Image (spheres, coloured by chain):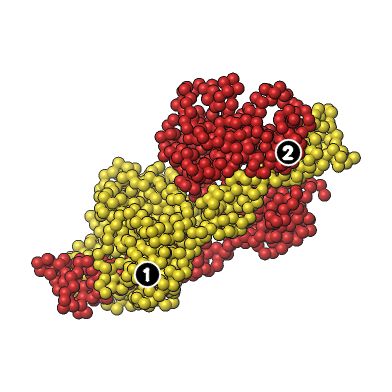
Chain colours: A red, B yellow
Amino acid sequence: MRRNIFLENTPLEEALSRWLSLCRLEGVCFPTESEFVDVRNSVGRITAESLFALISSPPFNSSAMDGVAVRAKETFGASEDNPAVFELGRNAQYIDTGEPVPPEFDAVIMIEDVNELESGSIEIIKPAVPWQNIRPIGEDITRGEMVLPGGHQVRAQDVGALLNSGLEKIPVRRKPIVAIIPTGTELVENLCLLEQGKVIESNSWALLSLVEHLGGFPLRNKLVPDDWDEIRRAVENALESSDAVIINAGTSAGREDFTKKIIEEFGKVSIHGVAMKPGKPVILGVACGKPVLGLPGFPVANWRAAEEFLKPLLREFLGRRREKEKVIRAKVARRISSRSGFDEFIGVKVGEVSGELIAVPLSRGSGISMSLVRSDGYIRVKRGCEGIERLDEVEVFLKGEQFDPERVVLVIGSNDHGLDILSSLLFRNYGLVFSAVNVGSAGGIAAVIDGYAHMGGIHLFDPKSGEFNVPYIKEKQTSERLFLMNLCWRTQGLIVKEGNPKNINSLKDIAGKGLSFINRQRGSGTRILLDYLLFKENIKPSSINGYEREVFTHMAVAAAVESDSADAGLGTMASAKALSLDFVPVSKERYDLLGRRSFTETEAFNLIRREIKGEEFKNEVDRLGGYDLEQAGEFIPIDL
Amino acid sequence: MRRNIFLENTPLEEALSRWLSLCRLEGVCFPTESEFVDVRNSVGRITAESLFALISSPPFNSSAMDGVAVRAKETFGASEDNPAVFELGRNAQYIDTGEPVPPEFDAVIMIEDVNELESGSIEIIKPAVPWQNIRPIGEDITRGEMVLPGGHQVRAQDVGALLNSGLEKIPVRRKPIVAIIPTGTELVENLCLLEQGKVIESNSWALLSLVEHLGGFPLRNKLVPDDWDEIRRAVENALESSDAVIINAGTSAGREDFTKKIIEEFGKVSIHGVAMKPGKPVILGVACGKPVLGLPGFPVANWRAAEEFLKPLLREFLGRRREKEKVIRAKVARRISSRSGFDEFIGVKVGEVSGELIAVPLSRGSGISMSLVRSDGYIRVKRGCEGIERLDEVEVFLKGEQFDPERVVLVIGSNDHGLDILSSLLFRNYGLVFSAVNVGSAGGIAAVIDGYAHMGGIHLFDPKSGEFNVPYIKEKQTSERLFLMNLCWRTQGLIVKEGNPKNINSLKDIAGKGLSFINRQRGSGTRILLDYLLFKENIKPSSINGYEREVFTHMAVAAAVESDSADAGLGTMASAKALSLDFVPVSKERYDLLGRRSFTETEAFNLIRREIKGEEFKNEVDRLGGYDLEQAGEFIPIDL
């Protein structure tokens, strides 16, 4: 069997509309039929038709107050000097809120305005207006009135009105059953089954929650290996038991990507390959009158394809209209290049810097599941757009409810373990979302000066002066008023395997020895430190095997060493210690936070500084290893 | 036992903070302890602490593509003229996306760039860069890295990252158990138990969904009558089995309002009566180390009090921070008077008229459960504020996700059954939310001219000219360019009981006969018609028993007649027919829609007009009775 090397590049909207047309043509049942549920258990369900009140509410004239029911005309002329006296049980009657007003009465006097006399009679000192404090029958809902339109998602606050209108069972759309079939020989179901070369199956669980959230009923198949017959059997079963089937994944050009051919065994494929990134390897088809989706395996691609195709599908099943997306406008913090011909979706973190909303693009890798965790929303770069310049205004499509840019502190620059701890403390103690984006120290300085970050974490050694950070800031010759505050001193060195089996004690031990190295990206403080050390010791970069192999964080360096993918890399002692690796100290460096002066006047800054100088931060950072907080929270003069 | 006639008026914020302080003092356990759940089933739960990755993702260097793994240096110099040839199994190897890259290789060439030769060898025509198309270990998440902070609500898109970081069981806050005890002798559990004077218990079901939505575990007690011992027993049980108890209601000054005293039997009451409207009769206390809430019984008051007190309580239990409320600014369509000393909450419907957001205040009655259904959010009139003038800008606190003012058509004016049908069709067919607010015809004209409604429904007879509507519009002498479009002709008349037992055939049969009448509010077209008829027939309003008794809709008139609360009222034939009442025709009238000319250029207007002229509308309206759609959708010249 030849594999499908070349996928199509169908534009997104066209792919969706072609697929949904095919669905209708092939007899897919949109929307699903209705079923009756108890109103008390209907929240989240979609009404199948407009609902009209069967009874009025209140169903009788009822008292709006706790008080006494009287005949209004018998109160006329009552005053403080000349109170009207009523005999309970004869021409007056106690009545509580909500009780029916007996037909012989036409007004209720609130209890606060009633004097109870010894005799059991009462007196009032103010005349009543006819029908005062009486809720007329049907004041809330009248029989026959529409309570909810069809296609409405029932909310908690609708439940009362529905019951009050005499609706106890209501017709709602049956939840479409969506079968999810995770496939892949490289996957395992549980962490305890993990072994070399395997990864845990996770996409199906995220989809499962998504299907539930969208109003469907998810049905997860057990994990199926990449075996033609096994997948075929799973799909056959799913087509029998559900309204739609997701095959997850096998949609690309791998040797065991059977998804397309298996769908074609049962039905038709209308789309294979969509001009979107991430999410290109999508398969859309119909089999046995059921929509079938093949979704890509990388988590971000998987999620994006589900958003673009599964979501509209469930909308069709439930007879719902497209909801307006929540959009805000923000300036992008980084240039975004784009391959024209594709709709690109780029996750962003949004914060408010000096009164302007700033969207910081996150890593675009379709395998970076953390970008789904970290992003507040995404930017869509349309087909044909060549890219977006830095500080251009863009639309950000927001993801959810938990978005509050005013509580976000954007920290762009170098990454650090201590910063992570600070972040966690600030969220826990004050609800501040400390959003750190790792672009290296040089990027951090630019972000602060250009006004798209509150602070930048930087650790740049200047060999000429022997100073940290300040010379690099001065070099920028900015007129912005800035501050520099120390976060920590930390130890940098060579991260090597546990027990240091290759006996690496300096960079010289690596150069030309055929040992493999893992490097940090250009512009990072650690890279600048490395280049300085190589220069000082007169080592040629080309003699380091792996010099060109770049990763973006200390921990990524440590992870490469831990996994035997490199023998050594330069990074912090804390990173080595976190993975129980050995560490050869090379130098101590100062890690500072740079920001605009105006930020020091905010409440957020005060909380941050208080936390940095606090015991909790100190205790947690001390545990990392290689840290010195002597100077933490001190301002460092810049003298621009 | 004397009742508590006078409630306190504790300011809202003070009430909350005093109560929560008492909770802490009395040993309420905030936040709840943590429990471990499977990540796959954790969506919606609140993390009890920060979660750190236990493994890296990817856990090994893995291929980012389907292709061939090679050693990069063996590809150097490859070109179209001079392809590099690799022997599979020796110095190259097929590799699929996600598979581990064997340690002897350091680059992956994507399958599209590989030529498969007959011999089983392959050739490539472009050199590979070392580490190209390889996802380094930890690219996504590195062991030890923070995946989620504590106090975070897990979302579907977090699930993948958690599993990828080796987290299968995570600590989350235990769901606080909230017991809900509905009380009230006037209530019944099911509609089949309804009898004269009873209403169905509904508040507890709305609260139940709210508790679930807020992350708690609701436990509903069965309905308890207003009996001291029974309520006491239910509260005692609830205090044993739950983390917090809601008693619903019995919080006011009724004869059987036991809630306060019963709480005091077990613990302390810190607040009885809050300076808010609706929702004043709130009781806040603590018993046996559990918070206890007594909530008012009227549905809108019940909901508001739950929003203001139950919501923050659950936040404390779950260790969450206060979320930012979604607020928009809009102009109010009506003057709002306010009693200073109270925080008033007024439900509003929001639409966009001529580019401006308009908030239309809905009925304020705390018994109007439909205002919870109809409102998009609420306005808060702060204590001390004397009121808000018409077209003042206010903050609207939005309720939920389904808010889209661009799809809202505000129709302010007179109510009509045909308009309800139009509303339902527009929502079903086009997703337009047709928001009708009943203020009568005169109010409708004002709303359109002053620009806070898209259209106004009006039916005003001018005795001088014998014309409908046009003279009333001309009278306004506005310079606005307006349109008037007919919706229908309809029959007005006397709505009387089935079989017309009092033999009412004209208004004369009511006047001075002691029969009871139910009237419509001043400014409504029907009221103007009545006054004209009384004038014409020389009947004094004071001779009509019930002339001063006003309701706001035709259906409310019909409901009053149906329930024997009035013998007759003036209204449409459709209203009489809806409740199977008899009807004595009096006149035919023209019901038109008035709007600004600019509105006719919108898509919404075109959809509305198309629907009015369509078969579906005609068929459904014909069934109502008394309608004539001959002229429906025709423009009526105004000649201002």
Q: Position of residue A79 (x, y in %)?
A: 12, 66
Q: Which residue is mark 1?
A: B266
Q: Position of residue B519 (x, y in %)?
A: 26, 65
Three-letter code, disc 2: Asn
Residue lying at the far right of the rendered structure: B119
Give me the residue at 45% from left, 46% from top. Answer: A430
Q: Position of residue A453 (x, y in %)?
A: 50, 34
Q: Is residue A428 above or below residue A508?
A: below
Q: Position of residue B34 (x, y in %)?
A: 53, 58
Q: Which residue is mark 2?
A: A500
Three-letter code, disc 1: Phe
Identify the image quadrant of residue A365: top right
Q: Chain of mark 2?
A: A
Q: Is residue B442 above or below residue A541?
A: below
Q: Nearer the viewer, residue B229 or B289?
A: B289
Q: CA distance from mark 2 to mark 1?
A: 67 Å
Residue lying at the far top of the rendered structure: A464
Q: Is residue A252 left or right of residue B580?
A: right
Q: Nearer the viewer, residue A459 or A215?
A: A459
Give me the residue at 58% from left, 62% from top. Answer: A175
Q: Is residue B98 above or below residue B532?
A: above
Give me the residue at 26% from left, 57% from top. Answer: B523
Q: Chain of mark 1?
A: B
Q: Are marks 2 and 1 on the same chain?
A: no
Identify the image quadrant of residue B520: bottom left
Q: Is residue B142 left or right of residue B500?
A: right
Q: Is residue B324 left or right of residue B8?
A: right
- Verify CB contact (< 8 Å) between mark 2 and mark 1: no
